[in-house]
Image (tube, grey):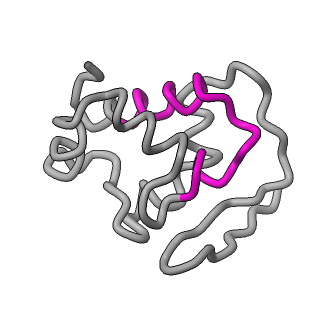
Amino acid sequence: MRKVLLPLGVGACVCFCGCAMVAGETGEKVYNSACVACHSTGAAGAPKVGDKKSWRQRADQGFEVLVNNAINGQRSMPAKGGNPALTDEEIKQAVGYMLARTGIPAN
């Protein structure tokens, strides 16, 4: 499957892979399809998975705040990572997955 990254505004990017997300996707699958482009590289100021300092600052605001920001977009990050087909629950799972991979509990 060929993936194409398209720029969105200042420093934001979205992956359009031509694949439809299936309802109930796991956090890891959602991360790999919608979040990895920015959260693995730090593109557009996104906190990189594994960077405890960057994630801790955000996690201190509360898990629900992180989820809300991911659902609605924050600064350069588009709502739902640019995939409006994702459910709020799938976004919540992806945020939890990124926190877990970073070693920060989702409170």
Count the labels in the image: 0
Residue at 61% over, 34% down: 29
Q: Nearer the viewer, residue 13 or 48?
A: 13
Eyeballing the image, is 2 above or below 80?
below
Magenta segment, prevailing SS (helix, strand or loop): helix
State which quarter of the image contains the C terminus.
top left
Residue 99 rendering spot, x and y as whole percentages: 32, 33
Left or right of residue 21: residue 91: left
Foreground pick, 106 / 41: 106
- Quadrant in which the N terminus is drawn: bottom right
Image point (43%, 34%), residue name: 67
The answer to whether residue 97 is above or below residue 34 is above
Residue occupying the point 61% across, 36% down: 30
Q: Which of these two is toward me, 85 or 72?
A: 72
Asked if 78 appears above or below 30 in the picture, the reply is below
Q: Which residues are magenta?
A: 78-98
Residue 4 image position (x, y, % from top left): 74, 68
- What residue sits 36% from the left and 38% below the top? 66
Q: Is residue 30 above or below residue 9?
A: above
- In the image, 61: left or right of 101? left
Please check the rendered image and state whether residue 71 is part of the magenta-colored stretch, yes or no. no
Relative to residue 79, is residue 54 drawn left or right?
left
> Does the stretch in magenta take in 90?
yes
State the image coordinates of residue 22 (x, y, percent, origin top left).
79, 27
* Residue 86, horizontal then vertical, whole percent: 69, 35
Q: Residue furthest bottom?
A: 10
